[in-house]
């Protein structure tokens, strides 16, 4: 029976909890996202960690993500940008739960140069974690991108997040794939076709015709013999290429990009960036999240 | 009991049939769209015109729209662009139905300067009808826009459609409004809020940040006190503004626009065009469709 701490990422769709002993992750347990757990967040938390509690209570619990939203467990504020890792850590909401200190980490908020506000909850742990893991990343001006349902583009200078922008590319792709007249329903998973479509979508996006390029996903099947897999790849390339072109222009970024995420999606973004002449390097999303949460919870993970 | 002809627009969602006597529309009947009628198109047609058939059989039937698609009643070809009204009329598919000649009008197909194919079925009747009604429109180079679920942008020269591009703006808006995390569900129909959001969406689109501007529909509610109606107006303005900027660039059009459609949607497009410094004038969609179908069916309507 060892003393342990719990760190975790509780997002809209998933709860991932890690048991940390002596700076090492020794166990993981998954539970329902906060959208499902909702008002019963505490019960969902207890259900998920029950086997660990049977041994002993944790020394502390540190959580990031939508768990801190208004409809989460306990609302945590947003740290305003520019924000460094210490300002973020200081903005956490702490409370006592059965004698255990729980910290729900703050999100980040910013106002863009164009006056548009933006928010994130959860991704900031990965951004700060990346800087903790790799001190070189916390020097100079960096563009850190977390591709996903709601991609986050963060401009980071000397470890401080200056501003960021959310682009809901993954959500848009899912809507088009599942619910539109453009997304084919008869995909057979042909990777070569998908890759060819992806390349053509990237090329089209580079011409600045993202909206006017969408219908080609259907017309190229009707009139140019393209397959369903080609069309899905095309839509993905068109949207990702468009996201990259717009976000880089908005953040006035003329330098390389650090991608944080899972390998498959990061690979798509790296290819899309290369087409637009942008170098990138990749960091594993889970490792960055754990580093950020560990630092927030006073541990090195 | 008068001799009569039937003309109609049979699209995906609606069947609209008109009874024409001596060049005047004397009755209208509505029926199911071709997506519902499907393989039973003939039965749906008979059901819809039954009261007219009780008098007498029509002299002829002329139909446009998705009725001519592969999954329609009888497949009609696409007339290839450039196409004028005579080439379009000649491409119709004709057949005999209980002794009545039925013509199912062709769609239009084109290949853009960028090599991207495109198709329309139904809108061409309105475009050619507009040129029939207003001979001035059939002179010189014109940009004719039919806003809708799938907006059509047609470049017309001396009455010939040179090329066109489909932009699925209406479909995208519906997906965002109904199925996304960006479209608010608690709209109360506040027209002033909606108009303010629309104006801000148009401004954002002018900066070329359509994808990167989407998330503001949510962030401005969370962080800047904007309402659900504001957010819906914003999404509409962002998409319509983006559509206009992209389509005009693609078609290399630096002149005014003729809008064909219903009054409400045409008004939105006219305002959006004005923001981008483009003059427009409007034609009623139904009147143009009837003029096109009437011409196709050898009548002046």
Image (cartoon, coloured by chain):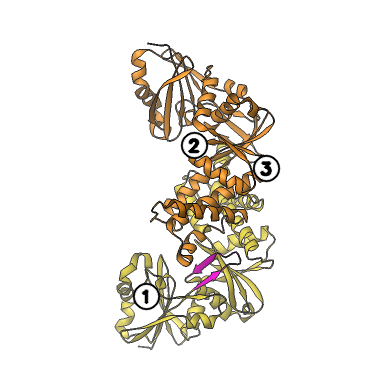
Chain colours: A yellow, B orange
Magenta region = A108-120
A117 falls in the magenta region? yes
- Could you tell me residue A269's position as x and y percent? 60, 61
Q: What is the C-alpha distance between the residues marked 3 and 1?
A: 53 Å
Q: What is the C-alpha distance between the residues marked 2 and 1?
A: 49 Å
Res. B168 in view? no
Residue holding disc 1: A74
- Could you tell me residue A212's position as x and y percent? 59, 46
Pointers 3 and 1 within a single chain: no
The N terminus of chain A lies in quadrant: bottom left
Tag 1, which chain? Answer: A
Q: Say which mark, if any, is on residue A42.
A: none
Seen in the picture, residue B211 relative to B244 is either above or below; the reply is below
- Residue in the picture at 53% in, 83% down: A86
Q: Say which mark, if any, is on residue B262.
A: 2
A97 falls in the magenta region? no
């Amino acid at each position: 029976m060892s003393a342990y701490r719990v760190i975790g990422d509780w997002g809209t769709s998933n709860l991932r909890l890690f048991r940390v002993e002596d700076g090492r992750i020794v166990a993981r347990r998954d539970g329902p996202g906060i959208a499902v757990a909702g008002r019963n967040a505490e019960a969902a938390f207890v259900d998920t960690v029950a086997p660990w509690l049977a041994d002993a209570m944790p020394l502390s619990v540190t959580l990031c993500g939508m768990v801190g939203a208004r409809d989460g467990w306990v609302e945590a504020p947003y740290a305003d940008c520019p924000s460094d890792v210490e300002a973020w850590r200081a903005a956490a909401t702490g409370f006592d739960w059965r004698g255990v200190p729980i910290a729900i980490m703050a999100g980040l908020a910013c106002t863009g140069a164009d006056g548009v506000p933006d928010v994130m909850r959860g991704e900031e742990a990965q951004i700060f974690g990346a800087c903790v893991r790799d001190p070189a990343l916390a020097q100079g001006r960096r563009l850190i991108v977390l591709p996903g349902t709601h991609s986050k583009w963060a401009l980071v200078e000397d470890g401080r997040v200056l501003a960021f922008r959310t682009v809901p590319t993954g959500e848009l792709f899912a809507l088009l794939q599942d619910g539109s007249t453009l997304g084919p329903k008869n995909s057979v998973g042909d990777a070569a076709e998908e890759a060819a479509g992806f390349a053509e979508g990237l090329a089209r996006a580079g011409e600045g015709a993202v909206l006017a390029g969408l219908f080609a996903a259907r017309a190229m099947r009707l009139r140019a013999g393209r397959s369903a897999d080609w069309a899905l790849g095309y839509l993905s390339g068109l949207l990702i290429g468009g996201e990259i072109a717009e976000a880089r222009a908005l953040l006035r970024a003329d330098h390389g990009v650090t991608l944080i995420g899972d390998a498959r999606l990061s690979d798509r973004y790296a290819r899309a960036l290369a087409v637009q002449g942008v170098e990138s390097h990749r960091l594993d999303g889970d490792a960055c999240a754990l580093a950020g949460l560990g630092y927030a919870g006073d541990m090195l993970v």
